[in-house]
Amino acid sequence: MSASEVAGLLSAEEVTLSHIRRAVHHLPKSCRAVLYDEAHPLHPSAVGEFFEALSYELLLSASESSPSVVSIAAKLADAVFIPYDKYSPDGLWYSRDGGIRFKMKGRVAAEMDLLIKTSDGVRIFGEVISGSAGTKGFLSEIAAKKALLSEIYGDPVEFLLVLPYEPHSGLRCVGENDAFAVIPDGDTLYRNVPKSEVMMRKLSPAKSTKRVDGRVW
């Protein structure tokens, strides 16, 4: 299964209120409050975190109908944090907030937004972008992450870019096996759920047969 096929799955998944609620609940309460305050200087950052969480929830949901998707690395509130041991093998380690980090020789080498493994042994990493972004350093960053995953796992690696809008030419993907998925206006969908509905209630993780701890992804 290729990155373009995963992109097709993700783009075709219908966004529901359940997806949105779970995405908001991945954010700390302080971040949820900022998300609903569009005048707050940290609002754009909260929007980015929401869209990343929404992309993850949609990917989990879409993958249930695809036998070609073997596993998706858990993240955010689904991740289990274990303090980093500098003597542990190189590879994936979660930050305290459930971010996906890769450490090499005791140092953070890269952070990735989404990790997918397919039935034919392809590993796909995703980056989620919500706002307008420049392209400076983008190509080299993606190439470095590809090389890192190939070094650690030895499998073919492809790249998936997720956006809430059609990408301009500078943000199109960087290789013939790479792809992009669009979740139209996905960065604004939190508005469909009232702030009062998500500030206090805690949701259980979505049921998923594909979500795994990233350390065994």
Image (cartoon, grey):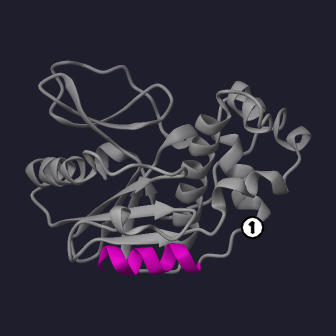
User: Measured along the vertical axis of the image, is residue 149 above or below residue 15?
Assistant: above
Q: Residue at x 30, y 21 (%)?
A: 84
Query: Quick check: can you spot residue 204?
Result: no
Q: Residue at x 55, y 58 (%)?
A: 55
The percent position of residue 170, horizontal first and vertical second, equals 34, 63
Q: Nearer the viewer, residue 42 or 158?
A: 42
Instruction: Label the magenta part by its dominant secondary structure.
Output: helix
- Number of marks in picture: 1
Query: Quick check: can you spot residue 183?
Result: yes
The percent position of residue 92, horizontal first and vertical second, equals 28, 39
Q: Residue at x 57, y 80 (%)?
A: 12
Q: Nearer the viewer, residue 199 or 160?
A: 160
What are the residue bounds of the magenta stretch? 1-12
Label 1 neighbour load within 10 Å: few <14, some 14-19, many 20+:
few
Helix, strand or loop at label 1? It is loop
Q: Which residue is mark 1?
A: 16
Q: Is residue 112 magenta?
A: no
Q: Is residue 3 magenta?
A: yes
